[in-house]
Amino acid sequence: MFSSNAYNYINVLDKAADASWLRETTITNNLANVDTPGYKRKDVDFESVLKSELGNTKYISLDEKVNHADLDHLNAVTYTDASGYSYRLDGNNVDIDTEEAELASEQIRYSGITDSITQEISRFKSVLK
């Protein structure tokens, strides 16, 4: 059996795609609850988890960072955003315009991540031919 880190980028991209999908679902849930009194918007954080896991050292290559990343710790975190803040009288803090813009942005991000996964797999296929 060969020890290889060939799939590390794909594994990290897979975790990023999962986090992006979770964020899309969370934003859609926020939109569904835009008229629910007292509802507080939720959001998903993956970027800070990824940055923490890969580290901030600029003298280490990205390849080394990815190869040493512990993928078990690379999970998105859902949190309640500004739970004490609400500009509405009913206590809801969901702004429909902001949520729709965030949803569109996340859909573009998810599309980019899945395209990157497809390109990585295509590179493997071209090598195997």
Image: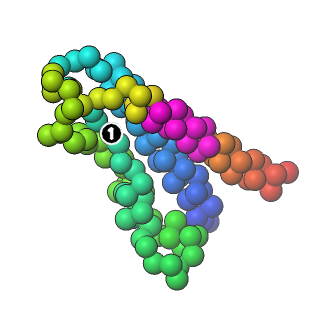
Q: Residue at x 21, y 32 (%)?
A: 87
Q: What residue did someone put label 1 on?
A: 43
Q: In this view, does 115 lie above or below 86?
A: below
Between residues 3 and 41, which one lies in front from this camera angle?
A: 41
> Is residue 21 found inside the magenta-colored segment of the image?
no
Q: Is residue 110 among the parts visible in the rendering?
A: no
Q: Mark 1: which amino acid?
A: Asp
Q: Residue at x 66, y 42 (%)?
A: 115
Is the magenta region chiefly helix, strand or loop?
helix
Whether residue 113 sits left or right of residue 53 in the image: it is: right
The stretch of residues the image draws in magenta is 101-113
Q: In which quarter of the image is residue 93?
A: top left
Q: Position of residue 47 (x, y in %)?
A: 42, 54
Q: Is mark 1 on a helix, strand or loop?
A: strand
> Is residue 105 found inside the magenta-colored segment of the image?
yes
Quadrant in which the N terminus is drawn: bottom right
Between residues 44 and 40, which one lies in front from this camera angle?
A: 40
